[in-house]
Structures are given as C-alpha cells and as structure tokens.
Image (cartoon, coloured by chain):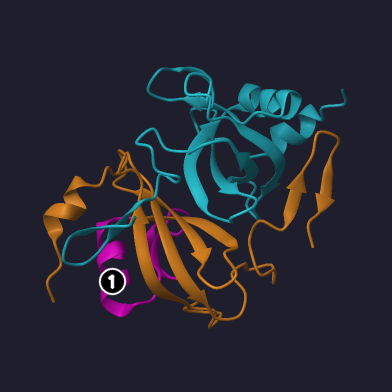
Chain colours: A cyan, B orange
Amino acid sequence: MNVNRLQYNELKYNEEGLIPAIIQDVDTREVLMLAWMNRESLTLSFQTKKATFWSRSRNKIWVKGEESGNIQTLVNIYYDCDADTLLVMVKQKGVACHTGSRTCFYRELTEKGETSGE
Amino acid sequence: MNVNRLQYNELKYNEEGLIPAIIQDVDTREVLMLAWMNRESLTLSFQTKKATFWSRSRNKIWVKGEESGNIQTLVNIYYDCDADTLLVMVKQKGVACHTGSRTCFYRELTEKGETSGE
C-alpha cells in the first residue's frame, strides 16, 4: 500500500495533532457529523475503508460504529484550500448519531429558541 | 429582536470562545467550507442574514464575501448532538472559495497523492 506520508504531513494539524473532518453521506448529501482525525486515524481510514477518528473524550482511536454497528464506509476524502479541514464522503450504515437520528445535526438553532429538526 | 442569549451560552465554545461552523449550500447540498464563529458572529449572522465568522488569522469579525461580493445568505442553522458544532445552510452568491472554486474542498486526498477534484 502506497500511503503518501509526506502528503499527510502537509495537512495542517492543530497543536493537538488533529484535523477536523466533516462527514457527509455520499448518497443523501446530508452532513452527518464533525469528528477529528490524527495521522493514524486518517491512515487507518484509508487502509480499512472504515471512517476512523480520534476520540477527544476517550483519548483514543475510534472506529465509527465499532460498538453500534453503524459503520461509515469510506468513499473518498477531500481537503480544503487551507489544508486544515477534511471532507469525508461515506456510505452510512444505519444512523450516524448516537441519539438514533440519521445525522447529528437534527436540531435547528433559531433566534428565539430550539426547534426540532426531525 | 428576540435573540435567546442563554441558548447561545449553552452551545459549547472552545477555550478560544469559538465553535466550528460547517457551511453547506442549501440548493446543491455541497459542503462549501468550514469556518469558526464566536457568539458575536453568530448573533450578527442571524441579524444580518449574512454568514459572519471570526477570522482566526486576522483576529476579527469577518463577513463572508465582504470584499469579494460572494456573500452567503443565511437560510438556517443546525447544531449537533454535542452542541459543539454548527451546520449553516446558505445561499451562496458566486463561489465560496478565494481560489475561485465553488467549494473550498476541490482537491481529493488519496493514498497515493493529490488529484484535482474539479
């Protein structure tokens, strides 16, 4: 496997060695969640074809869906003009959110208060 | 105008007082960019209906498109299950990226190297 590690270095990770990754459903185009990757989780995502992140709360590598079964199969990854954000296109099995919602962005923020999104 | 400031407080801003905002084109469903908001820019976004951010490089409020004319008209804002990320739906005038691309995510990251996305 020809992983270009130099390219990974050229991505701009923050002071914690992390880069934000926007996860989008390739079929519905819904934005599912925002997670964080380090170099290891990015490499693992490519190698396993399963979206893999760095859990900031548990401080460890986190294969999305490893417990729920709701894995995200990697389709492709884009990076932005500043090389400091990733856009990860996935095929979502089941739902993305631990609340049971398809997407983590199920609530609308309004000037007056919250309204349920679905 | 009835801006619920308590609700803004309930959003989880990072130690710099910022929250990441994913910007999505409401018509094409393209993810356009990731930017950062503080409470002031969030309030301004609602009040002016123009997506307004905090520029971390210039250290000031930044009305998207204020120089280029490529403004983003606010449609609605969602927040995620952890209340630490925003999803901002916009109508994009012109292109989102300062490079001239429609979206900032115009390059694909591959295991072997970069390939142009458009």
Q: Nearer the viewer, residue B91 or B18?
A: B91
Callout count: 1
Q: Is A42 displayed left or right of B116 in the figure?
A: left
The residue that appears at 61% across and 31% down in the rendered structure is A51
Q: Quadrant of the C terminus of chain A?
A: bottom left
The residue that appears at 34% across and 36% down in the rendered structure is A99
Circle 1 sits in a helix, a strand or a loop, which is it? helix
Q: Position of residue B73 (x, y in %)?
A: 43, 77
Q: Which residue position is annotated with label 1? A: B46
The residue most toward the front is A94
Q: Is residue B40 magenta?
A: yes
Q: Position of residue B96 (x, y in %)?
A: 59, 70
Q: Nearer the viewer, residue B52 or A107?
A: A107
Q: Which image quadrant for residue B117?
A: bottom right
Q: Is A47 displayed left or right of A83 in the figure?
A: right
Please state the extent of the stretch shown in magenta in the rendering.
B38-63
Q: Is B54 displayed left or right of B11 in the figure?
A: right
Mark 1 belongs to which subunit?
B
The residue that appears at 77% across and 27% down in the rendered structure is A5
Q: Is residue A103 above or below residue B95?
A: above
Category of crowding for the residue at label 1, using alpha-carbon neighbours closer than 10 angstroms: few (below 14), some (14–19), many (at least 20): some
Q: Is residue B50 magenta?
A: yes
Q: Which image quadrant for residue B81?
A: top left
Q: Is residue A2 above or below residue B59?
A: above
Q: Name the amino acid, label 1.
A: Phe
Q: Position of residue A91 (x, y in %)?
A: 64, 41
Q: Position of residue B14 (x, y in %)?
A: 32, 40
